[in-house]
Image: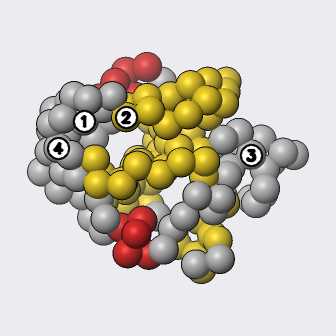
């Protein structure tokens, strides 16, 4: 779930929390339901960069820090483009949703994300 000055949104997410799931991501899928997404989870804060190799649908990528705060949004990543998409440093999560949805809903940097994978003692929006 996300919230910010723009309101709240709930997504049904698939979890990618190991190397093979993160490597596969949303590759080779022709579509994704509007209220769906994929949440990539990393064990420690790090610099994250994604690409769209073998990804057939445009995506918005929300790069999130360990406290659950959206630090950067890459809008409408181009299908099949292998250009690296840097998200920044000190990140532990990336939420991929359908391309254009973040702008349409008003989701912005600084928004809060709620999910049990965040350390609940440090989360800006604990479960």
> What scheme was used to colour the molecule?
secondary structure
Residue density around tag 2, few if under 14, some if 14–19, many if 20 or more, within 10 Å = some
Residue drawn 30% across the image and 32% down it: 51
Q: Secondary structure at mark 3?
A: loop
Residue density around tag 1, few if under 14, some if 14–19, many if 20 or more, within 10 Å = many
Instruction: Give the residue pinned by disc 1.
Output: 52
| Distance of label 4 from label 1 (alpha carbons) | 6 Å
Whether pointer 1 and pointer 3 mark residues with C-beta atoms closer than 8 Å, the reply is no
Residue extending farthest to the bottom is: 7
Residue density around tag 4, few if under 14, some if 14–19, many if 20 or more, within 10 Å = some
Whether pointer 2 and pointer 4 mark residues with C-beta atoms closer than 8 Å, the reply is no
| Distance of label 2 from label 1 (alpha carbons) | 9 Å
Q: Disc 2 or disc 1, which is closer to the eye?
A: 2
Tell me where residue 121 appears, x and y as whole percent: 87, 46
Which mark, by number, is residue 85? 2
Q: Earlier in the sequence, mark 2 or mark 1?
A: 1
Whether pointer 2 and pointer 1 mark residues with C-beta atoms closer than 8 Å, the reply is yes
Instruction: Give the residue pinned by disc 4.
Output: 79
Which mark, by number, is residue 67? 3
| Distance of label 2 from label 4 (alpha carbons) | 12 Å
Identify whether 54 is placed above or below 97. above
| Distance of label 1 from label 3 (alpha carbons) | 26 Å
Q: Earlier in the sequence, mark 1 or mark 3?
A: 1
Whether pointer 4 and pointer 1 mark residues with C-beta atoms closer than 8 Å, the reply is yes
Q: Of residues 53 and 35, which is closer to you in this image?
A: 53
């Amino acid at each position: 779930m996300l919230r910010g000055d723009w309101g709240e949104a709930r997504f049904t997410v698939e979890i990618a929390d190991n190397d093979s799931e993160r490597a596969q991501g949303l590759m080779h899928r022709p579509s994704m339901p509007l209220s769906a997404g994929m949440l990539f989870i990393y064990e420690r804060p790090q610099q994250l960069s994604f690409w769209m190799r073998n990804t057939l649908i445009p995506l918005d990528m929300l790069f999130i820090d360990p406290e659950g705060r959206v630090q950067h949004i890459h809008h409408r990543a181009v299908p099949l483009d292998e250009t690296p998409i840097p998200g920044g440093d000190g990140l532990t999560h990336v939420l991929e949703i359908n391309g254009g949805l973040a702008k349409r809903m008003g989701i912005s940097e600084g928004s809060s994300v709620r999910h049990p994978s965040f350390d609940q003692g440090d989360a800006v929006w604990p479960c």
